[in-house]
Image (cartoon, grey):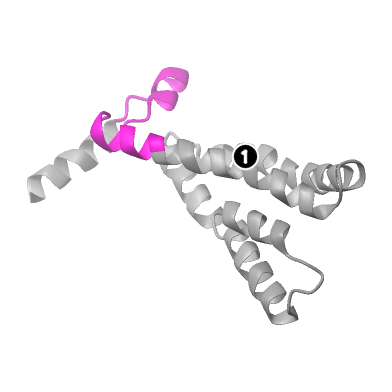
């Protein structure tokens, strides 16, 4: 998505239409492709019987951006030099998020136990028995 936002910022009025369509297609695909993976992970991490509440709650906050982002992009474009500036600025938090996810992935794969979900353990008292059972069955296979 960060690359898509950056590519949108670099488009010119002389850019061939086929290239504009290709950039927009790639950017749009990246922008909507995360949804299923995100919901599956939220549901997996939720305590038993709470997948609906967890996914519904996160979607409320997540899709608030669908309302606020166009307003923000429009304001940035209006006051700071057009859509090129708006898309360039959009790429900055996306790149920061990518860097944080890479750090998280490296940290989790090297330091944290597999499938540990401390948020639900602390907040709801969920003891992770299902995850422990899955780990034991996977260890048995190895």
Q: Secondary structure at mark 1?
A: helix
- On screen, residue 122 above or below 136: above
Decide whether residue 106 is among the magenta residues.
yes
Above or below: residue 23 compared with residue 63? below
For residue 93, what is the image quadrant?
top right
Q: Position of residue 94 (x, y in %)?
A: 59, 44
Q: Is residue 136 left or right of residue 9?
A: left
In front here: 112 or 45?
A: 112
Dot 1, how many residues are within 10 Å of its Cα: few (below 14), some (14-19), or many (20+)?
Answer: few
Q: Residue at x 8, y 45 (%)?
A: 140
Q: Position of residue 50 (x, y in %)?
A: 50, 37
Q: Is residue 56 visible?
A: no
Q: Is residue 79 above or below residue 120?
A: below
Q: Residue 83 is drawn in which quadrant?
A: bottom right
- Provide the residue span drawn in magenta: 103-128
Residue drawn at x 7%, y 49% as measured from the top left:
142
7 up-or-down from 118: above or below:
below
- Name the image quarter holding residue 134: top left
* Residue 87 visible within the image: yes
Residue 25 locus on image (x, y percent): 65, 71
43 to the left or right of 57:
left
Rendered-image quadrant of the N terminus: bottom right
Compared across the picture, whether 62 is left or right of 45 comes to right
- Left or right? Give the position of 93 relative to 133: right
Instruction: Identify the residue at the far right of this view.
Output: 78
Task: Identify the residue under disc 1.
Answer: 93
Along the line of sight, the residue nearer the viewer: 96 or 29 = 96
Q: Position of residue 77 (x, y in %)?
A: 86, 48
């Amino acid at each position: 998505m960060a690359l898509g936002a950056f590519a949108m910022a670099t488009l010119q009025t002389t850019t061939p239409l086929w290239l504009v369509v290709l950039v927009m297609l790639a950017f749009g695909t990246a922008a909507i492709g995360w949804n299923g993976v995100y919901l599956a992970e939220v549901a997996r991490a939720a305590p038993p019987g709470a997948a609906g509440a967890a996914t519904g709650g996160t979607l409320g906050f997540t899709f608030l951006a669908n309302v606020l982002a166009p307003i923000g992009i429009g304001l940035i474009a209006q006051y700071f030099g057009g859509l090129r500036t708006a898309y360039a600025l959009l790429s900055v938090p996306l790149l920061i998020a990518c860097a944080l996810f890479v750090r998280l992935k490296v940290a989790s794969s090297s330091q944290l136990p597999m499938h540990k979900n401390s948020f639900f353990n602390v907040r709801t008292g969920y003891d992770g028995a299902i995850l422990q059972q899955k780990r034991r069955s996977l260890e048995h296979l190895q």
